[in-house]
Amino acid sequence: MQRLSFFFGLIFLLVVLASCETEQQAPELTEEDLAELVPYVSLGRGVQASLDTTTTRMISELSIWLAYTDSLRPLLPFTSVDFGIEMVLLAAVDVNSAGYDLRFESVESLRDTVVATYRLFSPGTDCRPSYAPGVPFEAIRIPRAHTAVRFVRVDEAVDCAPS
């Protein structure tokens, strides 16, 4: 009987020791883990502009911004920018039909680069858009940074028929 209780005691001790947590190594950090969100405010957006090509641009001077505002037709007037502490990010995509929209989704600071992600919404395969050229665009303001800016475009088709 003593042997049996000793045997069960030993098994219990082994189970307890096996269930103890061992020190785990911290998982390696990815670039996404290192990124910090950058606050941004939309200055305005629209679907028409006098631009001949897809444009992604970081604008840090008022004179350059004013030249672009002459080419862009926002749905509502642009809000103001203080170029002393802010800069503008602009994304505009030249398309061959109506039904497109463009929105910034996120702005992140990653090491020495600002990464601005925008989504281009296009008409789905069940849509029948008019074939009128357009330029969906959005301009946002972010805190002034002295780093490179990289734009990332995400395409998404949106169906016209209700689900």
Image: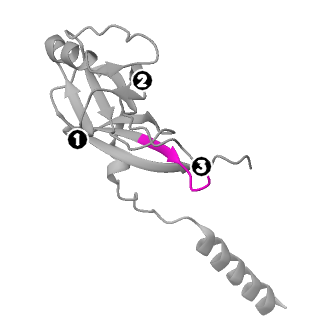
Discs 2/1, front: 2
- Could you tell me residue 53's position as x and y percent? 24, 39
Query: For mark 2, what is the residue?
Result: 45
Tell me the CA gap for discs 1 and 3.
Answer: 41 Å
> Which residue sits at x=41%, y=10%?
77
**Is 24 on the left or on the right of 163, as rendered?**
left
Q: Is residue 22 above or below residue 142?
A: below
Q: Are marks 1 and 3 in contact (CB under 8 Å)?
A: no
User: Which mark is first along the chain, 3 or 2?
Assistant: 2
Q: Residues within 10 Å of mark 1 (few under 14, many from 20)?
A: few
Q: Secondary structure at mark 2?
A: strand
What amino acid type should be assigned to the residue bearing mark 1? Arg
In front: 107, or 81?
Answer: 81
Query: For mark 3, what is the residue?
Result: 127
**Magenta-tinted stretch:** 119-127
Say which quadrant the N terminus sits in: bottom right
